[in-house]
Image (cartoon, grey):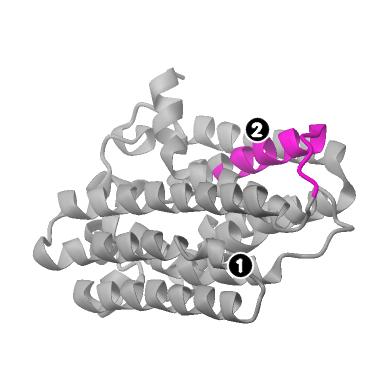
């Protein structure tokens, strides 16, 4: 197996939001920000799970990827299915073994995250094929389970429900973006995603509505005292996210979809970093 094939299998640029979600979950569940072994291990575990999920999904997305991403190793034939299964299984197993070192609560969250990852793609269940359910599954994985993994670093702390709510609502807009990139293959193979079923224009409106709703959630959290006024700059990231999606209204082509998806992932990661910095700086 070539290194480039491994990289193209796990698509590392899509893993950053999951890793940062762990840090967000941790800092919003505590006021003590000491760097411990658990704080180091937890993001590594989630990085492995996110990579394992993407690798496992590629196995059953082979036909769709031949249309959308023919450069990926399974679609191009430079990697065998058995190799991809081995990579995915190894990533999941190593993540679970490392999770034992954190604590049992963290391990339980890992097990649920792995189960969701498998259920999303495995043909016996294949949550991805169910309209909206597939989008919700991935959003739950990245916006709920991964922040909960951060909380579980010290499960005696308070669960950061309000921040998970914000990430979930914002994540709905980002999750729909991912489906834009795959729309050609999804339509050809009748994969029911929001863009392929409702059409591009309606999917754009859905994504914009989710981002707008996240702004409302943020403002409500500030107004009831769950967050301070220092979090108002996060509205800038929401605005940029809306502009990013709005760019699709002027350019309907696969190249534009790909750029918007990558922009959305980068923006989400930077916003999560901003949330962590504000939290640590303001306490």
Pointer 1 local density, CA inside 10 Å: few below 14, some 14–19, many at least 20: some
Pointer 2: what residue?
90
Please name whichever residue, 244 or 131, is drawn nearer the observer in this view of the structure: 244
Count the marks: how many?
2
Residue at the spot 12% in from the left edge and 62% down from the top edge? 252
Picture layout, residue 217 above or below residue 176: below
Position of 114 compared to 171: left or right?
A: right
Q: Position of residue 199 (x, y in %)?
A: 22, 75
The residues tagged by marks 1 and 2 sit, at their Cα atoms, a distance apart of 42 Å
Picture layout, residue 248 above or below residue 38: below
Which residues fall within the magenta stretch? 32-50
Q: Position of residue 166 (x, y in %)?
A: 55, 69
- Quarter of image, res 29: bottom right
Indicate the secondary structure of the residue bearing disc 1. Answer: loop
Residue at the spot 85% in from the left edge and 59% down from the top edge? 157
Q: Is residue 104 magenta?
A: no
Pointer 1: what residue?
228
Q: Nearer the viewer, mark 1 or mark 2?
A: 1
Residue at the spot 18% in from the left edge and 61% down from the top edge? 247
């Amino acid at each position: 197996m070539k290194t480039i094939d491994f990289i193209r299998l796990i698509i590392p640029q899509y893993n950053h939001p999951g890793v940062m979600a762990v840090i967000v979950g941790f800092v919003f569940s505590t006021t003590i920000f000491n760097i411990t072994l658990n704080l180091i291990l937890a993001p590594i575990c989630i990085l492995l799970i996110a990579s394992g999920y993407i690798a496992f999904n590629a196995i059953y997305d082979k036909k769709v990827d031949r249309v959308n991403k023919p450069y990926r190793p399974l679609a191009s034939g430079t990697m065998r299915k058995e190799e991809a299964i081995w990579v995915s299984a190894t990533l999941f197993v190593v993540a679970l073994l490392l999770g034992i070192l954190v604590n049992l609560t963290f391990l339980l969250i890992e097990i649920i995250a792995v189960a969701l990852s498998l259920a999303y793609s495995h043909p016996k269940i294949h949550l991805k094929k169910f309209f909206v359910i597939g989008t919700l599954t991935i959003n739950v994985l990245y916006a709920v389970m991964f922040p909960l993994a951060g909380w579980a670093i010290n499960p005696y702390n308070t669960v950061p429900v309000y921040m998970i709510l914000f990430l979930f609502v914002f994540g709905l807009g980002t999750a729909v973006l991912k489906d834009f990139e795959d729309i050609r293959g999804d339509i050809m193979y009748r994969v029911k995603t929001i863009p392929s079923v409702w059409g591009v224009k309606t999917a754009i409106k859905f994504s914009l509505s989710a981002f707008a709703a996240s702004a409302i959630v943020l403002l409500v959290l500030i107004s009831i005292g769950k967050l301070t006024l220092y979090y108002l700059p996060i509205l800038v990231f929401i605005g940029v996210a809306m502009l990013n999606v709005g760019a699709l209204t002027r350019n309907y082509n696969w190249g534009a979809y790909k750029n918007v998806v990558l922009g959305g992932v980068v923006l989400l990661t930077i916003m999560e970093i901003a949330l962590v910095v504000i939290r640590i700086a303001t306490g």
